[in-house]
Image (cartoon, rainbow, N blue to C red):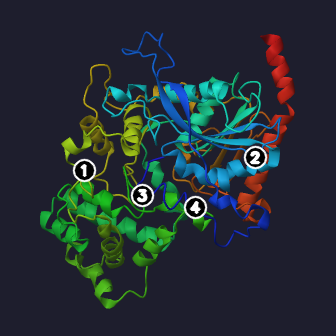
Amino acid sequence: MKISLACCIASLASQVVGRYAPLGPRDSGRPSLQYTPNFFDQRIDHFPGDSKATRHTNATFKQRYYVDSSYYKPGGPVFLYIGGETSGTNRFSNLRTGIIQILMEATNGLGVILENRYYGQSYPYNSSTTDDLVYLTTRQTIADNAYFSQHAKFPGVDGDLTAPGTPWILYGGSLAGAQTAFSVKEYGEILYGGIASSAPVTSSVGYPAWYNPIQKYAPQDCATRINQIIDNFDSLVSTNNTAAIREFKALFGLEVLTDHRDFATTIAYPIGNPGFYPTNTWQELNWNASYGSSDFFKFCDSVASVDAPESIAQVDYALANYTGGAPWTGLGGYADYVKRVVLPLCASGDYNSKDCFGTQDAAAWARPANSAERSYLYTSCTEQGAYIDAPKEGPSLLSRVVDTSYEQQWCRWAFPDGKFNKIPTEPDLSIYDHYGGFNISADRLAFIDGDQDVWNDLCYHSNFAPPRTESTDLHPQYLITGSGHHWDSSGILDVDAEPQFIREAHKWEIRTVKRWLNGFDQWKTSKSISA
């Protein structure tokens, strides 16, 4: 969820090294395995008879997919990794060393990555105008998964492995986790099962709860200092103290950002913020450094330092005259980190441009070139929502100048009404609710989440969901204590050598899938009889 420019770099590194990587000679070459792209003739419109739509086509597009048959033996299942909001090439680690590799090895299965429509090289059209994007819907996307499973062919693999004659088990994390859950719910007669990891199964317009795990689990001296700095800034805004606000922005080198919301989101980059951040945040933490980044903790080290040079420590007093002489503790380290780490990410030095930290260029948003960022924004604007905004009460790591209207304006600028398509005035939450929301359930649909995941309050184990007290073979669920955003998706080629909380989650997933496979023949027979 909430795509960042860093999402497919640090957190999806293809090489496995570091503390938990005792690679044996048998699989020492897997981290560098290369995969040949294949292309499937996918329907652009799966529902040409839908009277509610204003545009239909019988055309197809080339949907890219990748296959790993290195563990496959006849009779084994097919594991379909849902590509989600990025290129299929950025998911290779899941075949090489991650969850699909783990399940393939355990069951003699075949692994497949299917790139989502409107991502990577799987675009139906050469541009992404509002009309071109009319087929970017959850309904069409999950129909892709079912149709692909019924017609796919795998180079170098003999036999018919299509569903439902072969057990197809889906896996997806984050947005792809939701698509996994919805696919199994909607197409359970075709798709045998699925594991939905950190899957936002419900939607909301605003999502201030994104910051809750950070407030709870981040180093508390760091979080407390940021909360107080944000409170002080918001007080300046509420009293319209323009001179003080300019002084505050200048400490970060960002006085050129005249829109307070652009400034607020920019200084929140190291934490996580609305839109498309170019840094590694709390969301990019991972149990294995090869799949994530610890930059968040480096940021906190700067904010909470007790050994800062005098030149930095004195900045804490730069605005003390606006707070009755009380220092803004941690401000010097905060500003220093932003200037050292964030500002250099703007290659042009034009901080107020859309290519850097400004968002107020309406014409720039409207450029219709195909991109993952544009596709993800469209989904956010139409169905998913979850605009990250500041909480209405209590402590906040993000300035309260940021509310849902901040991101909603991007929707309005990016997607003007087309001939066949126009976006709603706000996301249509009924689309996700159609599949059950927090009450979603389907046979052989497993949910696995992390209690420190910023997206968890939209997931199956949300604090707002009904209590999850029972897990059964048909309806399994698992909450990983100490885990972040779909941390179960990464692996090191040796489950027993993983840290305990991940090791036991992976063993649970293996057991769950094996139990399902033990019942496949009976399921297939019952389908044949009922048919």
- Which is more foreground, mark 2 or mark 4? 2
- Residue 272 is marked as 3
Q: Residue furthest bottom?
A: 310
Look at the numbered discs 3 and 2 and tell me whether their residues touch, using CB distance below 8 Å. Answer: no
* Residue visible at 46% across and 28% down in the picture: 137
Q: Is residue 310 above or below residue 483?
A: below
Q: Residue furthest left?
A: 243
Look at the numbered discs 1 and 4 and tell me whether their residues touch, using CB distance below 8 Å. Answer: no
- Residue 291 is marked as 4
x then y, percent, for residue 90: 53, 51
- Sequence-earlier tag: 3 or 4: 3
Q: Amino acid at mark 2?
A: Met
Marks 1 and 3, how far apart in space? 16 Å
Q: Is residue 161 above or below residue 404?
A: above
Marks 1 and 4, how far apart in space? 30 Å
Q: Is residue 493 above or below residue 67?
A: below
Q: Amino acid at mark 1?
A: Thr
Asked where in the image residue 149 lies, by quadrant, the reply is top right
Q: Is residue 375 visible?
A: yes
- Sequence-earlier tag: 2 or 4: 2
Asked where in the image residue 470 lies, by quadrant, the reply is top right
* Residue visible at 26% across and 42% down in the picture: 365
Asked where in the image residue 525 lies, by quadrant, the reply is top right
Marks 3 and 4, how far apart in space? 18 Å
Q: Amino acid at mark 4?
A: Tyr
Circle 1 crowding by C-alpha within 10 Å: few under 14, some 14–19, many from 20: many
- Residue 104 is marked as 2
- Which is more foreground, mark 3 or mark 4? 4
Look at the numbered discs 2 and 4 and tell me whether their residues touch, using CB distance below 8 Å. Answer: no
